[in-house]
Image (spheres, rainbow, N blue to C red):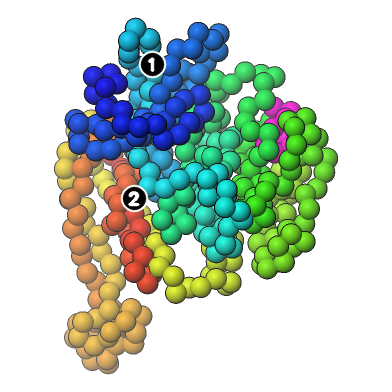
Amino acid sequence: MLDARYRLIEPIGEGGYGEVWKAHDPKVDRLVAVKVLSEDGSTDHDRQVARFAREAAVAGGLSHPHIVTVHDFGSALQDGRPYAYLVMELLDGKPLTKVLEGGRLPLPEVVRTAACVADALGTAHQAGLTHRDIKPSNIIIGPNATATVVDFGITKSSDARHDITTSGVVIGTPAYMAPECFNGSFDHRSDLYALGCVLYEMITGHPPFTGTSWHLINQHLNEQPVPLLRLRLSTPSELAALVTRLLAKDPADRSASAFEVMLALREIDRRYFDENLPTRGPNRYARCAVSPAIAAFGAVTQLRLTDRIPCPACASTTGARGTEGCRSCLGTGEVSAETTHRIRIPPGVRTGQRLRLKGLGWPGRNGGEAGDLFVVVRI
């Protein structure tokens, strides 16, 4: 038992500065992943604990289906030794590093996995956060090529007060680092370069550059990777061009945003790959106004959503032309339908905070799961 609460079941991997365990939380009766950092006597231990706390604060403030959910952070004494720990959702999947052990991935899986990562990065970047360590081991692959980004421990915030890194120290993993990172300069485009490296590896089976750390630094700064089409001829030209753009040495020559990359990947998926496969439905967004009292103390409230649906009297599909003279839809083919959902407003909610409701978004295609509903709070 860790901190008299979490029952550690078995180790499932290692993440930045910590061992990750599958665990059970009896307080809410759910399985979780617990990353544990023990006192190792090193002079850098305090900084590692600060990194743990940073990961808890950053990931805990993001709500997105492709970003790991953080439940708790704390410290405890176990057999006389101090431990810091981070409690996260237990993901159904395995690291991309394990998936890549079988070689390069099918191209549809490459595109859909990268689109998930780009979607997650877009949300982090909107919040003013740069991940700085996008690599296969920090991407968990779930069913249907869905991907979740983990390990926000070295994330850089636009708020300098939260930056715990040290000037002059290389932060990240050299095989996936943008050229500007070696000069201590980071922004959201550095994450896009790392995503380009991951895309290249999923397509070819190996990163764009290999070798010792110093070899990697020189290659990232001065050399171009082998063209994708020379290594995998079946790669769509648009995908090869996107990867080349992401791997540009000058950040100004890369894509403007992660959301732009996500849209490009989805268009490649739509144009080149089987649309009959089940796909997850789009997320849905709504606003919810609450009183200052509810914002402070929390409550369960009702959220009413209005949709346009096919007219049951004269139309069978959305957008179909209705029957002229229909009293229900007045010939438009669609009528308004209202649904009501009970949502829990947590205490201490802030204006602009997004609450995530799983499975209440738009329906998936061909039997795919529904998207999520994100409720933006207004006080």
x and y, in percent, of residue 289 in the image: 26, 45
Side of 295 relative to 163 (left or right): left
Q: Is residue 371 above or below residue 311?
A: above
Residue under pointer 1 = 83
Picture quarter with the N terminus:
top left
* Quadrant assignment, res 136: top right
User: CB under 8 Å between callouts 2 and 1?
Assistant: no
Residue drawn where x is 63% and y is 43% of the image: 194
Magenta segment: 177-184
Residue drawn where x is 77% and y is 61% of the image: 230
84 falls in the magenta region: no
x and y, in percent, of residue 371 in the image: 35, 58
Neighbour class for label 2 at 10 Å: few (<14), some, many (≥20)?
many
Q: Amino acid at mark 2?
A: Phe
Q: Is residue 154 above or below residue 290?
A: above
Neighbour class for label 1 at 10 Å: few (<14), some, many (≥20)?
some
Residue drawn where x is 34% and y is 54% of the image: 372
The residue closer to the viewer here, 350 or 205, is 205
The residue closer to the viewer here, 210 or 335, is 210
x and y, in percent, of residue 214 in the image: 77, 30
Can residue 63 be seen in this snapshot?
A: no
Q: Amino acid at mark 1?
A: Tyr
Mark 1 lies on a secondary structure that is strand
- Mark 2 to mark 1 CA distance (whole Å): 35 Å
* Quadrant assignment, res 355: top left
Looking at marks 2 and 1 on the same chain, the residue that comes earlier in the sequence is marked by 1
Mark 2 lies on a secondary structure that is strand
* Quadrant assignment, res 130: top right
x and y, in percent, of residue 281 in the image: 38, 63
Side of 199 relative to 325 (left or right): right
Residue under pointer 2 = 374
The residue closer to the viewer here, 1 or 286, is 1
